[in-house]
Image: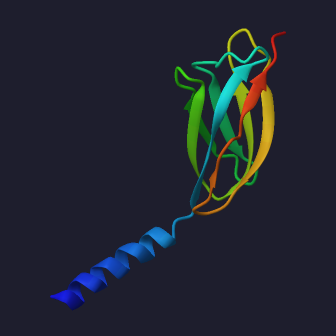
Amino acid sequence: MRRIFLLALYSTLSVVAQSDRGSIDGTVSDRIGHKVASASVEARNMDNGAVFHAETDARGVYTLSLPRGTYEVSITAAGHKSTQRGVVVTPDRLLHGIDVVLAIP
């Protein structure tokens, strides 16, 4: 019985370790420091054109789980200038603090 448990545990850990996804997260705010809720966050894979979307919550926070690759992340919000930033996502890596300050036109 113990052998079956260890085999199942090892199989599960192997699947988790083989993940090809990573994550990015951050906060969107304006120049004054106010958090921007409902900002659109779009990550476009530069190799294959795949697009992933997220929206900031009431605290201006977003999180995206992405397959490995190089991305251009665009953030837009009503009444603000949009901005872009390049990021490289690697498996099982969480990139914290991709924070953005949006300017007002």
Q: Is residue 16 above or below residue 84?
A: below
In the image, taking residue 86 as reference, residue 62 lies left or right, namely left
Residue closest to the far front = 33
- The residue sitting at 23% across, 82% down in the picture is 5
In which quarter of the view is residue 27 placed? top right
- Residue 35 placement (x, y as % from top left): 64, 19
Q: Quadrant of the N terminus?
A: bottom left
Q: Kindly give the residue lying farthest to the right in the view shown.
A: 105
Residue 101 x/y as whole percent: 77, 25
- Measuring from the top left, give residue 88's x and y in whole percent: 74, 54
**Residue occupying image coordinates x 68% and y 15%:** 34
Q: Is residue 63 above or below residue 78?
A: below
Residue 87 as seen in the image, left or right of residue 39:
right
Depth check: give the residue in front, 90 or 29. Answer: 29
Location of residue 11 (image quadrant): bottom left
In this figure, which colouring scheme has been used for the structure?
A: rainbow
Tell me what residue is drawn at x 73 percent, y 8 percent.
Answer: 79
Total labels: the figure holds 0
Q: Residue furthest bottom?
A: 3
36 and 64: which one is in front?
36
Location of the C terminus (image quadrant)? top right
Q: Quadrant of residue 99?
A: top right
